[in-house]
Amino acid sequence: MSTLQRPVVTGYGLIGPFGAGSKALLEAIHGERSCMGNCTLFDTHHQVAQVQGFRLADHVRNPRAERSPRISQFALAAIAQALSQSGIDPKLIASESTAIVYGTANGPAIVTERSLDAIVTQGLDAVEPLAFQESVFNAPASLASIQFKIKGPILALPMMWTAGLYALKQGYDLLRRGTVKRVLVVAADELAGETLDALDRLGFISPNDGGEEKMRPFDDRVNGAILGEGAAAILIESEDAARDRDATPRAHIIGCAIGGDALGPGAPDDSGDAMARVIRRAISQTGRSISDVDHILAGTITNRKSDLAELNGIEMLFGGRRRSCPVTSLKPYIGETMGPAGLINLIAGILEIEHGTVFGNRDLERADGAGIAFPTESEAQPVRAVLVNAIGVSGTYASVILEAAK
């Protein structure tokens, strides 16, 4: 594939606390669905954003897979949606020209917890015989490759809350180098008691200040996240491959960059330098300028340092334009889905472009970003290009530039 070509998105799928698909996501963003509530999977005093009423059989026919961990089932369902929407012939997917790049924050955490509990309380012999193959981080990707008969490269990236966009970067590079013709980019995570407890002890879960339990990114009362779960998948193809099968692109990916700040876990670079470097690299690939970006879908992990990392990075690059380029975080609507969060943002960016809408911020009453525009309600306006960010708990960053399909 020529390096002048841009990967195109031809299909996407979603599973989350909002339900399944883009219609359900839009209903959550517009306040028609509530995504947060009490946990029914394990005991916790925290609110969670849990996937409710999910049935794999509604998306994929595979009775054996219905016994797999929730994370694997979420991934299969999201992929099935993406492939269906793309209209691609299954024979093209079942080839060496298709790759899977999968990202996750915590992997199949529930089966891992169960196995470790068995070892500690009863010894090695108490571990379920099939537990190991389901507990490894790449298990959902391997299951997907079997389900859809994909014979190309399979990559798995345990990159915490930047996992979805890190996976996209690897898929983006595979296409640009001509290694494959299409890539399924997938990210998934599941709620688990030990994961929530660990993140709570590390100060990532609301309320980390003893105050009100609520997700309020960019508010001066920000105090952590409400943990969620789900999956997102997109099918990206080379322009030639999409054209050869008369596919309709949903959007072009014109820039994609990743990076880190080398500061260690839990301490994003609140100066904004690292975020600015990654955004700058993404934009440098596009042949466009900062002035061409119409909206920013934020990646903050909903604490003070990550809020500042993103806002200061935006201020460095956008300068006086920051007043006319609005910033939105979708996490107060759907919770912190961890690995899939960046891909969910990306799909939301496609919806903004297609619907001519900039989504608003929820529960943002005391904005903490001087001079930055934070819409509090969805606003109708033409959207040609969207900057999508992700920030991880270990100082990782990712930025993607989406452009309307021509």
Image (cartoon, grey):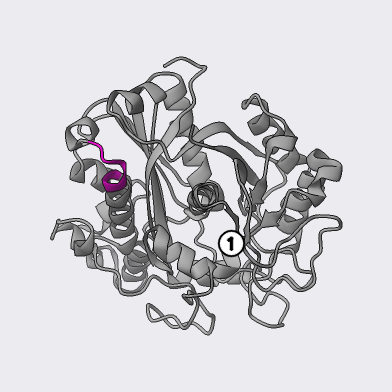
Q: Residue at x 75, y 39 (%)?
A: 276
Type of amino acid under label 1: Leu
Which corner quadrant of the image does residue 101 belong to? Answer: top left
For the point 64% across and 77% down, the residue is 214
Q: Label 1: which residue?
A: 330
Give the x, y percent position of residue 278: 68, 36
Number of other residues with Cα within 10 Å of mark 1, as a class: few under 14, some 14 to 19, many 20 or more: many
On the question of residue 378 being in view, the answer is yes
Q: Magenta stretch: residue 358 in it?
A: no
Q: Position of residue 200 (x, y in %)?
A: 59, 71
Location of residue 148 with respect to 304 vertically, above or below = above
> SS class of the residue under badge 1?
loop
On the image, which quarter does residue 68 sit in? bottom left
Q: Nearer the viewer, residue 8 or 163?
A: 8
Where is residue 234? Give x, y as percent: 39, 44
What span is in magenta?
83-88
> What residue sits 27% from the left and 28% below the top?
245
